[in-house]
Amino acid sequence: MASERYSERVQKITREGGAGSMEKPKIAFDVDGVLGDFLYQYSRYHKKIYPDSGIDFRMITDYGVPAACGILWSLPGFYESMPVMEGAKELVREFAEVCEIHCVTATPAFAKKVRKDWLLQQFPEIEESRIHFVDACDKQAFCIDSGINLLVDDCPETCLSFPPEKVYVFRWEYNKNLKDMGYKVGRFADLRGVLG
């Protein structure tokens, strides 16, 4: 079975633990830009306000650009209607068979309830107790303290705070250069290839 191959590879790549351990490896996913298509959603909301701007935020090369263009994520419905990233549901479902799946996200306080509801609806394989709201600057410490073996994230600053073997960079235009620094960079199909 393919998931058994994933499990063997995940354990080889992510675990440092002792032989004979039956504990499943722990993989954590960021939400905005990894499980949820934040940049598509941001582009959609931006277009509602500025229909002639022509900006496609999915093509930005600077991670901070959406913040500079306003806090559209605070508008009603932004988090509730965010599309799921292509391939995310299938990958989480497959990995949940052989890994302990967590979400580690820096969601604003006002959106935590709707974010949790969205995650539980879109990804029923993720237990509610494994959804963690953590400031971006604290993700590394949280993952170490929680025994997370691999984080899948898109924020360049967050990724750079981890050793390359402990993070998988979900590729966007603003972070693809991390590959030159020894980080594994790609999309979900590539993550299957790394772990499968």
Image (cartoon, grey):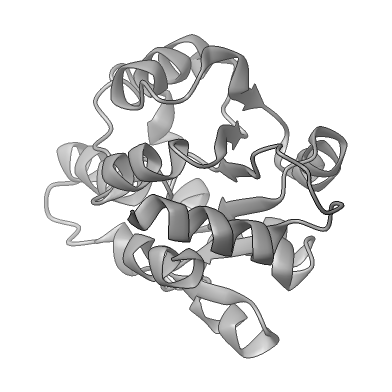
Of all residues shown, which one is farthest toward the front?
20
| Residue appearing at x 24%, y 25% in the figure | 81
Q: Is residue 159 visible?
A: no
Q: Picture quarter containing residue 16? A: bottom right
| Residue appearing at x 84%, y 44% in the figure | 144
Q: Is residue 139 visible?
A: yes
Q: Is residue 28 left or right of residue 143?
A: left
Q: Position of residue 70 (x, y in %)?
A: 45, 41
111 or 22: nearer the eye?
22
Indicate the quadrant containing the C terminus: top left, top right, bottom left or bottom right: bottom left
Q: Position of residue 34 (x, y in %)?
A: 43, 49
Q: Position of residue 103 (x, y in %)?
A: 56, 33
Q: Picture quarter containing residue 166? A: bottom right
26 or 32: nearer the eye?
26
In the rendered view, would you say 17 is above or below 148? below
In the rendered view, would you say 13 is above or below 181? above
Q: Picture quarter containing residue 167? A: bottom right
